[in-house]
Amino acid sequence: MTRILAVVPARMSSSRFPGKPLETINGIPMIAHCYFRALKAKEVTKVVLATPDAEIMQFGKDFGIETVLTSDKHERATERAEEALQIYKKQGEEYDYVLLLQGDEPQIDPEEIDNLALALKNSSNCVVNIIHPIEGEDMTNSSVVKSILDSHGNILFFSRAHIPNKSNSGYRQLGMIGFTAKILEKYCELEPTTLEITESIDMMRFLENDIAISSLMTHKSIIGVDHPEDIKKVELLMADDESVKNGLNFL
């Protein structure tokens, strides 16, 4: 039986928005949105928060959320996800695949998580990243990571810059990435790369080492919460959210 671990990395010391994992969106802490939505995904075996912070560990304990304590030395969410995989491995729990679900995208859709899991199982590549179309201001927003694709749907490049040049539309990388367990372990064996550091984009480490990444398109617009003002934008979009109405309000 295929086993899939979904990891939601979260840390309180975000440079752009300190403390954001526990900021509330429509009365619910942001990481709770991510965690409980991921629990609804049918393809996932286990969901866990991975954090270096005592506050988030206590939050998990208080509300029955599975949480693991990881190193505070990680520069990349991908490294934190790999440490979570190793924690379970040492406990005798083996997983075939790992889904990295960023803790600052609270609109995450369980159906899209399942789509990611299925795409990963069927892909000839060991990494699959969900993307969606963008246009207008998103193209010039450095908080939005843009993706360039080849004719087969593989990702050629990521950048925070306006790419393609002079284009009014493009594709945004979402923080929903699937890995085989082996390739995730390989990630942490590789040294950080020049463009990974320059762009501050985890997946450049794979691309700079000639490891292919498949794209998976979604047309469901998901906003990343990068700044405090993004909270209000997301709250408006989620005002009539069915997941909130149907039991996410656990507090």
Image (spheres, grey):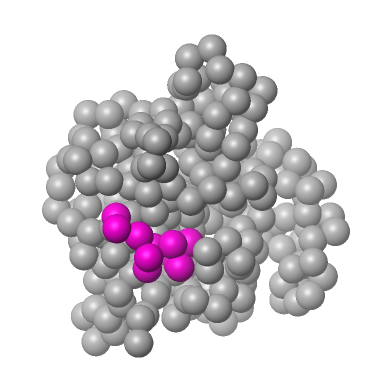
In the image, the segment drawn in magenta is 116-125
Front position in the image: 135 or 20? 135
Q: Residue furthest front?
A: 151
Q: Residue at x 29, y 84 (%)?
A: 93
Front position in the image: 8 or 133? 133
Task: Examine the image and state in which quarter residue 223 appears.
Answer: top right
Q: Residue at x 37, y 68 (%)?
A: 121
The answer to whether residue 26 is magenta is: no
Front position in the image: 19 or 5? 5
Q: Position of residue 116 (x, y in %)?
A: 48, 61
- The kind of secondary structure the magenta stretch mainly shows is helix
Q: Position of residue 9 (x, y in %)?
A: 44, 59
Please say if 82 is above or below 59.
above
**Position of residue 178 in the picture relative to residue 106 (left or right):** left
Q: Quadrant of the C terminus?
A: bottom right
**Position of residue 208 in the picture relative to residue 202 (left or right):** left
Can the viewer see residue 47 in this picture?
yes
